Image (tube, rainbow, N blue to C red):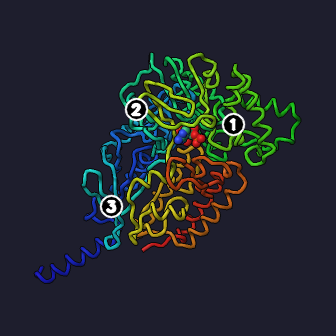
Amino acid sequence: MEKAQLRIWVSLMSTRTSESFIDSNLDYDVVVIGAGISGLYQLYCLREAGFRACILERGTGVGGTWYWNRYPGARFDSESYSYAYSFSEELLEEWNWSEHFASQPEILRYLEYVADKFNLFKDIRFSCEVTKAQYMEEETCWQLILANGSTVSARILITALGILSEPTFPNIEGINSFSGESFHTGLWPKTPVTFEGKNVAVIGTGASGVQTIQEIAHEVRNLTVFQRRPNWCAPLNNSDIDVDEMNEIKANYKDMFAICSESHGGFIWTVDPRGTFEVTAAERVSFWEYLYASRGMSIWQGNFKDVLSDPVANKELSDFMANKIRQRIHDPEVAELLIPKDHGFGTRRVPLETKYYETYNQPNVDLIDLNRSPIRAISPKGVITSEGEYKVDTIIYATGFNAITGSFDRIDIRGASGQALKEEWSSHLETFLSVQVPDYPNLLMINGPQGLGGNHPRNIEYSVEWVTSLLEHMKSRNLRRVEPSISAVQTWSEHVRAKSGSALANKIDSWMTGINTNVPGKDKRVVGFRYGGSVQSYRLFCDSVAKGGYKEMIFS
Ligand code: NA7
């Protein structure tokens, strides 16, 4: 071949390479951030579909939420088998759960087993914190900068960050001056922590606080719980699973997952089609007694159809739950402190408990009402409220997370016009299907804002498969760039707002409505922070986009 011809050929090839989805100049076709439940399955699917992919993970192991939340008593509040991956029959057959609601160590073992079984470890880079992600228009790729200064490039960036992965500490003066040990439930150390003989403070009574309190109350010398707002808790009713029961569960997996895809939130509990007042008072109470004695979220997710939307029905149920608390607590004043007065049952995330209320009957447990005596400061010796100082050896912050957008905010994500995603979202939070954001081409989110709540792994599997199909669509047609159209984003956001209408939960301050009093700017409820519709309506929308050839998205 003549030199001039060779030059033309090389230049043709390089044009051809740069015009195809696959570009060997890039480090990867797809980079996934996060090795939790979403990231692991995403890596598996990408590999099956023939993409060069890797996960960047800031921790030193897989598991995401279940890697970081190692606090005492951490466990599932969805049934273990309904929370597990469903994509592999072999995996379903092999894995045996020891409890209906597995504890964190067992969950982590499961996720490590999955990563090992599908040989995922080889493509996960641990201790890799992504600090910046910049979309490069000319190269049609994402350039990532890691905390160690190195860079990684990929055609597509998938975030699998989790919705509760940015722990927040309370905004209290002197928090760093404490001389004892202090922990956040969402950043629990791997090394064992003992409480024996110690005076311990727990700040926060959400799901993590409740699980921690009931677990350590028997071990500590004295436990002081600092409560701002009580939550409505329901009995977990956990129990062991023996071999026969596990075999029965395995035999019914297909039916169980079918129920999950037919239920509103992806759980195994489906809403009762009757209205609260369509039955007699005696039938109502007997149904609620049955649900109170049933496992997990039954009383929240399997209740009468109107209890989470009709204030009168909700009040009736809340009164039933309040009486349960009164029956279980010896001291009536303590009982009243533990009964929420500012929201009805099920309108915030319901912590599931095991003898949580009885904990407050123990002589070594005190409940401090922060509404009466707010925390003024943390001192070197403990917690100072308006009524005095509580000297403790250990402080546990069970103060929650900067939900959903918080994990994006910690990365400086810049789109095609150079705008920071954090700034973009601080003025208006809009997505397409919770998967894409205009001006951030080739950025795909698993369970981003405006996404489904409920039983996450069920939604994760669906979203990961949807995203993988989109990428296969692009690869097979040599499409290198994808971005949602503005009109598609508007249509989706209108749909999200419409679906946020009737649920009482949308009128209450909680992380589910975008509130976190410890984060500046997160003091106003965001309509459609999460998708309020059902699993079915979400999937119907996404399926129709895929079936219609992704007309709502702009490819080039
Ligand atoms: P949550 O549910 O957000 O709970 C956080 C708790 O911490 C809640 O009781 C808060 O009270 C309390 N909190 C937060 N900041 C403060 C300050 N500054 N002072 C006193 N108390 C404070 O987080 P979790 O980790 O328990 O659970 C998160 C999710 O994980 C849960 O919903 C399940 O889905 C699993 P507040 O209610 O705001 O008055």
Left or right: residue 365 versus residue 16 is right
Camera-nearest label, 2 or 3: 2
Dot label at residue 340 = 1
Foreground residue, 460 or 223? Answer: 223
The N terminus: image quadrant: bottom left
| Vertical position of residue 177 compared to residue 148: above or below | above
Estimate the x, y position of residue 410 in percent, counting from the top left.
Answer: 40, 53
- Image point (48%, 73%), residue name: 554
Residue 301 seen by the camera: no
Residue 126 pos. (x, y %) = 31, 44
The reply to whether dot 2 and dot 3 touch (C-beta < 8 Å) is no
Between 539 and 186, the one lying in front of the other is 186
Residue at mark 3 = 154
Cα distance in 3D space between marks 1 and 3: 49 Å
Res 414 quadrant in image:
bottom left
**Disc 3 residue type (three-letter):** Ala
